[in-house]
Image (cartoon, rainbow, N blue to C red):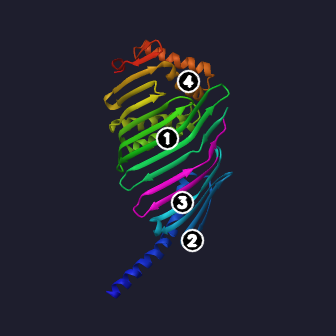
Amino acid sequence: MKKFFLGLLFVLALIALGLPGLIAAWLPGQIEQSLDEHWPEATLVVERGWFNTTAIAQQGRTQLKLECHHLRWWRGTLLDANGNLMLSEPQTNIEIDARFNLDTTLHIHAHSERVEWAGTGTNRIDAPTFTLELNGSGEGKLVASARRLNLADILANELALAEIQVESNWRGSDERLDQVRLNIQTERAAQPLSQLNLTAASIDREALAQLNMAWSELQNAPPDSLQAQMAGLGLISAWQQLVQAGLVLELETLNLDREVSISGRWQPDQNMLGLQGGGRTPAALDWISPMLGLSQQLPAEKARAKAWQWIQQAADNDYLRLDGEQFEINDAAIN
């Protein structure tokens, strides 16, 4: 029995001393590969130790520094990393804490005091936080929050939101996501809570990745160029693949200032779209107008006039029923 316990202690000591060395040999290559894929312009410096690895990636004034600790068994982690990401545009310093646990779950937390970026006006997020949790069974959870979001331009467009809460949960396999759920809560100044609850089901992972890639290429391509045309074709192809996989989107709740309430369901492969609800037209305009003005660089008055024109056109096509300051969606006309 004594020999058994001595042997067990020897094996445990070997694991405790040997596994950190294996992680130290494996980790730098993984960091380098990830940077090559996502940040190829960065210069990487890695200091490798038996129990710790330090990585610094830098491009101009942008710097990522991570201190990685190997096998902290008393914390239940195979890999424990902390550090910060300093960005020049948008201007911010993001504190990062990440853990890859012995049970193969991943936990990442990031926060910053403030994020500011250049534009034609004030663009700022106060006290943003971000938490991501993943496990080996294909389930994940993302939680993000901010004390305040302010977007404004010199054309008098402004969108100011407070106490923003975003939560997303998903489950699935390597091939597909069975369900993704998104919940958003926020409020405008002196207005009641607004919220969005959206569920997406039967999502093809590969098609979704292709859609994101094509969209990114389209955003970076010169207008009317061959690159833009190819990205557009890729976008269409990825969308068709998502539809063929049986994508279903369900809007459980869209509630704006407690004055507009909309719900619905869209199943594109069956050409089925159902929307119900309505509310006060001024409240809908208060949300649509600044988004339209900021995105299309329209003066605030023109943005509100254009948003109202959209509502009137929808009513002319019988998609909406207008009654004074109230509107109601005509579900029968949409289908």
Residue 136: image location, x then y, percent: 38, 56
Badge 4 element? helix
The segment highlighted magenta reads 92-119
Q: Earlier in the sequence, mark 2 or mark 3?
A: 3
Q: Is residue 143 left or right of residue 67?
A: left
The reply to whether discs 2 and 3 touch (Cβ–Cβ < 8 Å) is no
Q: Magenta stretch containing residue 50, yes or no?
A: no
Residue matched to label 1: 165
Badge 3 element? helix
**Quadrant of the image containing the N terminus:** bottom left
Q: Is residue 127 left or right of residue 168?
A: right
**Vertical relation: 219 (above or below) 14:** above
Residue 49: give its label.
2
Q: Residues within 10 Å of mark 4 (few under 14, many from 20)?
A: many
Residue at image location 56% in from the left, 66% down from the top: 53
Q: Residues within 10 Å of mark 3 (few under 14, many from 20)?
A: some
**Vertical relation: 13 (above or below) 159:** below
Residue matched to label 4: 289
Badge 2 element? loop
Whole-angstrom CA distance, mark 3 to mark 1, is 31 Å
Of labels 4 and 1, the one closer to you = 1
Of labels 3 and 1, the one closer to you = 1
**Vertical relation: 281 (above or below) 138:** above
Q: Magenta stretch containing residue 95, yes or no?
A: yes
Q: Earlier in the sequence, mark 4 or mark 1?
A: 1
| Amino acid tagged 2 | Gly
Of labels 2 and 1, the one closer to you = 1
